[in-house]
């Protein structure tokens, strides 16, 4: 009878373990679906654009003739390949899935998915980049009024520290 109980317990643990794996897979699938709706695969687009701009600026500063533009394009392609190896979506996705599954329950991810599939969620996704940029501009403009005072405070602190 004890052996029977042990076998039942082992079978129960095996089933529970299989259910946990299924739950983990479902949780990860929901995280992936949310990341797709949130266009997380596009998070690094500004990085790529900034690197491309750096190369273009360096090319312009070098005053290279237009005939050497192929050199610029070649190096931009190599830079893109380097970025792909470091931060391509295939590199980021597993960590992003872990990040979202560790911060949101499966139920919460389902709610997020439902929201981003709704008309309001779609509008949020459409408007958020512009709102973020405008918010940064507003903050920067307000921050500029504090810069002189902060710089004065830094100078005052330096004077006080040097005096001691």
Image (tube, rainbow, N blue to C red):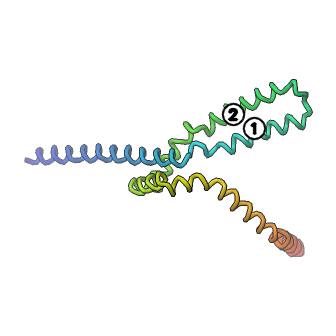
Label 1: few (<14), some (14–19) or many (≥20) C-alpha neighbours in 10 Å: some
Residue at (53, 42) in percent of width and height? 93
Q: Earlier in the sequence, mark 1 or mark 2?
A: 1
Q: Which mark is residue 119?
A: none
| Residue found 71% across the figure and 60% down from its top | 136
Left or right for 18, reference 105 = left
Instruction: Give the left or right position of residue 108, taking residue 85 as reference.
Output: left
SS type, badge 1:
helix
Please give the name of the residue rendered at 81% of the width and 67% of the height, measured from the top-left corner: 144
Asked whether residue 126 appears in the rendered view, the answer is: yes
Query: CB of mark 1 within 8 Å of CB of mark 2?
Result: yes
Q: Nearer the viewer, residue 4 or 95?
A: 95
Q: Is residue 161 visible?
A: no
Give percent across and percent down for residue 29.
Answer: 42, 44
From the top left corner, tell me how far across and down residue 142 is, in percent: 77, 68
Q: Quadrant of the C terminus?
A: bottom right
Q: Which mark is residue 52?
A: 1
Where's residue 1, x and y in %? 7, 47
Query: Which residue is the site of mark 2?
Result: 80
Answer few, some or many: residues within 10 Å of disc 2's Cα (few below 14, many 20 plus, some between 14 and 19): some
């Amino acid at each position: 009878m004890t052996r029977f109980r042990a076998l039942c317990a082992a079978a129960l643990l095996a089933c529970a373990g299989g259910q946990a794996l299924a739950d983990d897979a479902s949780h990860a699938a929901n995280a992936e679906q949310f990341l797709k709706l949130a266009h997380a695969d596009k998070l690094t687009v500004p990085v790529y654009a900034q690197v491309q701009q750096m190369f273009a600026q360096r090319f312009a500063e070098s005053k290279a003739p237009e005939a050497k533009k192929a050199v610029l394009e070649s190096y931009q392609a190599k830079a893109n390949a380097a970025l792909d190896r470091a931060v391509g979506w295939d590199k980021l996705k597993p960590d992003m899935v872990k990040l979202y599954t560790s911060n949101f329950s499966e139920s919460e991810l389902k709610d997020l998915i439902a929201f981003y599939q709704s008309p309001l969620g779609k509008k949020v996704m459409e408007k958020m980049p512009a709102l973020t940029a405008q918010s940064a501009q507003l903050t920067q403009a307000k921050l500029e009024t504090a810069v002189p005072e902060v710089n004065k405070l830094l100078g005052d602190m330096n004077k006080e520290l040097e005096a001691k």
